[in-house]
Structures are given as structure tokens and as C-alpha cells.
Image (cartoon, rainbow, N blue to C red):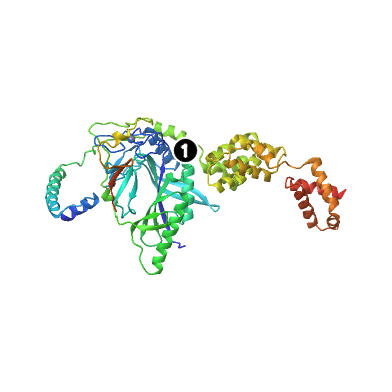
């Protein structure tokens, strides 16, 4: 599980402390264990479910709609610079 | 170059819709950063995608035009990765059931036909655009993101590794762009909207080169990468399987440290979109909308209009030029129209690196040029000079003709010139009469010079011979 936690954190670009890693190892173990119960269900003759309701071909026409104003665009963030969003650099 | 070169391309072309793939934000217009965004393309919690029908139809048309199988039902998937250009931390793309599979593209290179197998065609959204601040990609302090491109509809074409050289790869991209242009799903005037990742192997492991924009850079990037791999082999070293990025400023490829495998993307079905059933009547209707494609048009021009293969190819590689040819060929001498459009017009477009629709040329202006040649007002050479002028500036061809003092010398005027030349070159005339054929060329040259290049050399030769034989 230790390797798994490291792999997932590096894919998600999240740096974790040693303590956090240990805590997450336990959590992930529990989560995977819980989900592994699904394996016990017999699904041999079942069609894979894609949606709870059978909907098909939901599409919209190619029409231009309203966009957000500048203050709306940035209302949830402090990380704005010259009209851009500021984000972390990922090497 | 080695025999074992294998190149496969994954090419993205922007589909020419008015609105984005999953929201109503416009695809063009204001250029200020983050001016064409909404909760959906900003990945705000709770915002849901709504699929653009036209983008889907364009994707189906592309798949059909490339001879692909289309599924009865397709869906979209989430490709998860964590990078600031993707605000919701996944890209909506097609994975297990794309819009097209197993097609092919046939192209011509140096007179030889070549078929490239198409593995798959799929529709996906473009991420946003990042700008690195305070350093290069890997060393910058932070990034600035503009989400105007986030959600722009793209069509990705994945080939089998059938390409054997950088030139073939470039020719393939050109052909692909031509087909998209014929389908009217793509704006070819912006080379920046064709982006490729390339898989390259020269016998050993393959390297993936990401991030190549346009036709020319594809050729350059591949050339560099092939040389790099061959140099490694010469030094007895192995080519490593890795992902590299093309850097257009230095023309080189650099290793990227990330080594994400397909499995790391954790693809799942996109639950916020429904399945798309491609019913046969829908598919048929879209199939009927597919126009005659470049290679079909080329064949027809040779058969129906008697153009040479080269002339037909030159005209068909630009959709709007082909449209102009067809209109003018109906009214005027087809051969002459073909000559002018495949010759001087194509030359000036290539020289300026523009497409017909970006030039100042149009059907009306070229009709005038053709008419002037047809009525003997100007020579074909004059026509070329005029086209050079009117291609880049909005000018009237007749005015340019006057400005340049063009006007074909014919009739009495030409006879007068012939007379003058004969009188002034008695020696040459005598030589010719005694059987020295090259003396005639000298005399024709004198006539051309005296008429300021405005005589037709064939006419001049004929008149001259008549005059001497008298
Ligand atoms: Zn939007």
C-alpha cells in the first residue's frame, strides 16, 4: 500500500508528509477493502450499466451563449494576475 | 536515413464550430485572457457538459471521409490528469469507443502513391493555455492560465506507424488538412491549429515527441529526432523508450521526466453525458454531405478537363482554388484557366505561404486576367506579373496592366517591329537563309527585346519566317 500511496500522490502532484502517508495508507486500505465487496456480486449475465436511466443522444445545437464577466470569472479566487489564473508550476 | 524508420502521428485539428464542445462559449472573438469562459469550461463544481451536436456531426463526417468504421453507439470518457491547464482535473475525450476506427488516407509523394492506415479518430476538448513565469517549463515559479481554449472541439487522428520519413509525415499532414478543408470542418489558414505528437523509432525502442505545431515543424522535429536516435546507435547506445517535447525555438527535442502510462489516466465513462447512437439514417445523411474529396477531384480534372496530373494536384490541394477553377473552366478555355491557376497563381500563393482564400485573388479578378490573355491583350508572362501584384494587394488587374505598360504587341505593330529587326540585322538574315537555324533565335530575341517582352515569341517567329521567305 505504501507504493500505491506514493504513486497516486505523484500522479496527483500532491506532496505528502510521512505522517500523512501513513494515515492515507490505512484509509486507502479500508476503502479498497470496502469496494472489493463488489467483486462478490455475480455479474456474469448482466449488461454494464452506463446510466441509471436510459437516455441517448442528448446534445445541444451549436449556438453561442453568454460568457462570464471578468469579475465573475475571478470571484472564487485570489490567484489572479493580469487577467490570468495563477497556478502551480509542474515540472 | 535508415530503412527501419517508423513514424506514427497523433494529430489534432480544431473543428470549426461556433461554440465550444461542451458549453456555449464562442470559439473565436475577443482575445483577452479568460474572456470566453463560463462555469463549464472553467470546471466549476456542479457545472455539467452539454455536447455540441455539430462537433459530433463533423467528427462522424471525418471518420467517414477517412474510410473508418463508425460504431453504432459511442460515448465519452474522462481522462484524469492533474495539470493547471485542465481545471476539472480531467479531460473529456473518447477512449474505448471512438467515432472512427480502421480507416486510411492515400497520398502522393514524388509521383508515388502511399497509403497510411488510420487507427482511430476521436473527438475531445482542448485544455487551456499555460504561460510559464520566471523560467522554462520545468523551472518556472508558477504558471498563468488562460481558459479561452479550454473546451475548444478537437478531432484527433491516430495513424499506424506507416510513415517512413519526415517528408512523408509532412505530406500526410498536408493531405489530412486538405480533407478537413474539403469537409468544411477546419480552417486551414491557421497552421497553428494543426498539432501533432509523433512516435518515432529507428529500429529500437520508440520515443514519443510531443507538442509539434504545423507542417514545417513536424518535418523539422522528426528530422532532429531521427538524427538523435541514429547518433545514439552509432555510439553504441540504446534508444530509451520515453516522452520528449519539441522545442520550436531551438528545433530540438528534450526528454520529459513524466512517464505517464495510459493506465495512469484512470479512464472512466463520462457520466454527465449520454451515449450517442449513430443511427443509420443520421450516418447516411452525413455521408451524403461529404463532397468530392481531393483525390477524387484530381482524377476528374485529369479525365474531364484534360489537365496533367501535376496541374490537377496543384489546384486540388487548395479547396478554394479548386472552386475557382471549376467556375472559370465553365466559362473559359479550360486549359488556359488550368495553366494560370496551377502555374502563376499557385506559385505566388506558395511563395507568400498563403492559401487562396487568404490572398487578394478571387474569381472576378482571375476571370479578367484570363480574358486579357484570351483576347491577346497580354501574354501569359504578363499575366504572371499581374497575378504577383494582385495576389497580395487588392488591385484591379486592368489597372496593373496599364501601370506596367503591358499590352501584347500584335498585328501591324508586331509586323513593324519584325521589319525593323530584319533591316537592322542583315547578316543574321543571310545566315539563316544559308541554313543557320540559330540565327533565327537571335532575330526572335531582338524582336522580343524591341517589344519590351510584350510580344508572343511564337507569333514573332511565324511572322519573321514569313517576312524572310518573301
Ligand atoms: Zn464555456
Dividing the picture into quadrants, the one containing residue B56 is top left
Number of labelled discs? 1
Dividing the picture into quadrants, the one containing residue B373 is top right
In this view of the protein, can residue B129 be seen by the observer? yes
In this view of the protein, can residue B39 be seen by the observer? no
Q: Quadrant of the N terminus of chain A?
A: bottom left
The spot of residue B128 in percent (x, y) is 34, 43
The spot of residue B283 in percent (x, y) is 41, 34
Q: Residues within 10 Å of mark 1 (few under 14, many from 20)?
A: some
Relative height, residue B116 to residue B25 (above, below): below
Using the image as rendered, state which of residue B157 and residue B214 is in the foreground. Answer: B214
Using the image as rendered, state which of residue B279 and residue B9 is in the foreground. Answer: B9
The spot of residue B1 in percent (x, y) is 47, 62
Instruction: Report the residue marked by disc 1.
Output: B183
Identify the element where label 1 is drawn.
loop
Q: Quadrant of ligand 1?
A: top left
Q: Is B73 positioned to the left or the right of B300 in the image?
A: left
Using the image as rendered, state which of residue B281 and residue A45 is in the foreground. Answer: B281
Q: Identify the residue shown where x is 65% and y is 36%.
A: B368
Subunit bearing disc 1:
B
Relative height, residue B280 to residue B341 (above, below): above
Q: Ligand 1: does it lie within 8 Å of the C-beta at label 1?
A: no
Q: Is B113 positioned to the left or the right of A27 in the image?
A: right
View extreme (front): residue? A82
Relative height, residue B398 to residue B350 (above, below): above
View extreme (right): residue? B470
Q: Quadrant of the C terminus of chain A?
A: bottom left
Dividing the picture into quadrants, the one containing residue B204 is bottom left
Amino acid at each position: 500500500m505504501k507504493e500505491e500511496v506514493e504513486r497516486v500522490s505523484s500522479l496527483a502532484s500532491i506532496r505528502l508528509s510521512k505522517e500523512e502517508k501513513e494515515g492515507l495508507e490505512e484509509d486507502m486500505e479500508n476503502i479498497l477493502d470496502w469496494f472489493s465487496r463488489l467483486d462478490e456480486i455475480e455479474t456474469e449475465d448482466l449488461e454494464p450499466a452506463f446510466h441509471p436511466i436510459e437516455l441517448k443522444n442528448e446534445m445541444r445545437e451549436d449556438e453561442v451563449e453568454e460568457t462570464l464577466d471578468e469579475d465573475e470569472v475571478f470571484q472564487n479566487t485570489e490567484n489572479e494576475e493580469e487577467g490570468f489564473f495563477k497556478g502551480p508550476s509542474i515540472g | 536515413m535508415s530503412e527501419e524508420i517508423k513514424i506514427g502521428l497523433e494529430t489534432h485539428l480544431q473543428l470549426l464550430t461556433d461554440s465550444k464542445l461542451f458549453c456555449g462559449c464562442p470559439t473565436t472573438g475577443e482575445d483577452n485572457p479568460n474572456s470566453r469562459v463560463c462555469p463549464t469550461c472553467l470546471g466549476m463544481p456542479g457545472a455539467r457538459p452539454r455536447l455540441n451536436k455539430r462537433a459530433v456531426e463533423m467528427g462522424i463526417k471525418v471518420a467517414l471521409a477517412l474510410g473508418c468504421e463508425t460504431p453504432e453507439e459511442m460515448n465519452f470518457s474522462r481522462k484524469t490528469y492533474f495539470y493547471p491547464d485542465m481545471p476539472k482535473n480531467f479531460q473529456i475525450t473518447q477512449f474505448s469507443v471512438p467515432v472512427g476506427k480502421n480507416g486510411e488516407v492515400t497520398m502522393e509523394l514524388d509521383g508515388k502513391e502511399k497509403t497510411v492506415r488510420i487507427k482511430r479518430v476521436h473527438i475531445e476538448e482542448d485544455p487551456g493555455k499555460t504561460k510559464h513565469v520566471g523560467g522554462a517549463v520545468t523551472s518556472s515559479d508558477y504558471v498563468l492560465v488562460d481558459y479561452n481554449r479550454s473546451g475548444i472541439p478537437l478531432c484527433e487522428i491516430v495513424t499506424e506507424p506507416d510513415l517512413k520519413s519526415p517528408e512523408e509525415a509532412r505530406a500526410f499532414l498536408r493531405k489530412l488538412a486538405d480533407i478537413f478543408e474539403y469537409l468544411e470542418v477546419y480552417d486551414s489558414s491557421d497552421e497553428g491549429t494543426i498539432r501533432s505528437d509523433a512516435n518515432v523509432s529507428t529500429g529500437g525502442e520508440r520515443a514519443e515527441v510531443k507538442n509539434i505545431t504545423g507542417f514545417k515543424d513536424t518535418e523539422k522535429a522528426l528530422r532532429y529526432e531521427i538524427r538523435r536516435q541514429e547518433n545514439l546507435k552509432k555510439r553504441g547506445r540504446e534508444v530509451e523508450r520515453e516522452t520528449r517535447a519539441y522545442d520550436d525555438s531551438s528545433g530540438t527535442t528534450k526528454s520529459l521526466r513524466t512517464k505517464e502510462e495510459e493506465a495512469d489516466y484512470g479512464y472512466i465513462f463520462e457520466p454527465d453525458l449520454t451515449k450517442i447512437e449513430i443511427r443509420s439514417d443520421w450516418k447516411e445523411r452525413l455521408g451524403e454531405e461529404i463532397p468530392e474529396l481531393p483525390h477524387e477531384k484530381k482524377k476528374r480534372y485529369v479525365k474531364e478537363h484534360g489537365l496533367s496530373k501535376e496541374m490537377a494536384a496543384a489546384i486540388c490541394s487548395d479547396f478554394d482554388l479548386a472552386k475557382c477553377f471549376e467556375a472559370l473552366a465553365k466559362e473559359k478555355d479550360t486549359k488556359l484557366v488550368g495553366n494560370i491557376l496551377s502555374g502563376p497563381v499557385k506559385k505566388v500563393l506558395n511563395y507568400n505561404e498563403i492559401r487562396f482564400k487568404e490572398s487578394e485573388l478571387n474569381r472576378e479578378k482571375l476571370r479578367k486576367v484570363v480574358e486579357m490573355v484570351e483576347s491577346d491583350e497580354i501574354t501569359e508572362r504578363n499575366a504572371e506579373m499581374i497575378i504577383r501584384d494582385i495576389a497580395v494587394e487588392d488591385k484591379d488587374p486592368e489597372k496593373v496592366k496599364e501601370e506596367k505598360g503591358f499590352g501584347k504587341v500584335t498585328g501591324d505593330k508586331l509586323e513593324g517591329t519584325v521589319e525593323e529587326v530584319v533591316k537592322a540585322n542583315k547578316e543574321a538574315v543571310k545566315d539563316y537563309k544559308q541554313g543557320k537555324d540559330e540565327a533565327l533565335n537571335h532575330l526572335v530575341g531582338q524582336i522580343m527585346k524591341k517589344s519590351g517582352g510584350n510580344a508572343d515569341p511564337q507569333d514573332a517567329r511565324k511572322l519573321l519566317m514569313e517576312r524572310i521567305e518573301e
